[in-house]
Amino acid sequence: MKNIAIVYWSGTGNTKIMAESIKEGAGDSAKLFAAEEFSADMIDDFDAVALGCPSMGAEELESDVFRPLWEELVPKLSGKSVALFGSYGWGDGEWMRLWEEEANEAGIELAHPALIVHETPDQEGMDECRSLGESLSF
Ligand SMILES: Cc1cc2nc3c(=O)[nH]c(=O)nc-3n(C[C@H](O)[C@H](O)[C@H](O)COP(=O)(O)O)c2cc1C
């Protein structure tokens, strides 16, 4: 069985709901962490990681906690199953395209297409999150 970490930053709870739904799909052994609770040295214990951050700034990752964590994780993610997710508001998902590009340029192979949800996930959005969690567990 894979050890799965779900690590998210969420200001108003939307990305947190996504993370919780991903955990439901990923199974009991998956562990959920707010970004503040996770550090790059903890990644060695996991085979798969779902990273979640909403669109903040101007189509950017949250800059105080999540971006520094992401930058520390990047060199440690090769060989792991990685998935990206997050919620957005008034944009068109550009922050996620930029984030995926950054991951690709760093040689990180994404195990699942990035999952974005507009504001608070509805039933369909939560189902998509559960599927993402399931796919990480194989
Ligand atoms: C400071 C700030 C900046 C934001 N910038 C963007 C943005 O550039 N593009 C966008 O689509 N939404 C933007 N949003 C909207 C959030 O991405 C959206 O409300 C999202 O659902 C928040 O997720 P959360 O509840 O997990 O924090 C911004 C929100 C805040 C508070």
Image (spheres, helix red, strand yellow):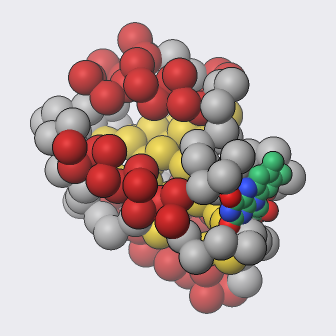
Q: Nearer the viewer, residue 38 or 91?
A: 91
Which quadrant holds residue 46? Answer: top left
Query: Up-down: is 65 above or below 12?
Result: above
Q: Nearer the viewer, residue 58 or 128?
A: 58
Residue at 15%, 41% (x, y): give it: 107
Residue at 53%, 22% (x, y): give it: 68
Q: Quadrant of ligand 1?
A: bottom right
Task: Give the image location of residue 64, x and y in percent.
Answer: 68, 25
Query: Up-down: is 121 above or below 21?
Result: below
Query: Up-down: is 120 above or below 110?
Result: below
Residue at 26%, 23% (x, y): give it: 76
Q: Nearer the viewer, residue 73 or 123?
A: 73
Report the number of discs.
0
Task: Give the image location of residue 33, x and y in percent.
Answer: 61, 34
Q: Is residue 73 left or right of residue 2?
A: right
Looking at the image, which residue sits at the far front?
58
Looking at the image, which residue sits at the far top?
41
Which quadrant holds residue 89? Answer: bottom right
Which quadrant holds residue 24? Answer: bottom right
| Quadrant where the C terminus is found in the figure | bottom left
Q: Nearer the viewer, residue 110 or 48?
A: 110
Q: Is residue 44 left or right of residue 23?
A: left
Residue 86, visible in the rendered structure:
yes
Looking at the image, which residue sits at the far bottom?
124
Query: Up-down: is 90 above or below 67?
Result: below
Task: Give the image location of residue 118, x and y in percent.
Answer: 68, 76
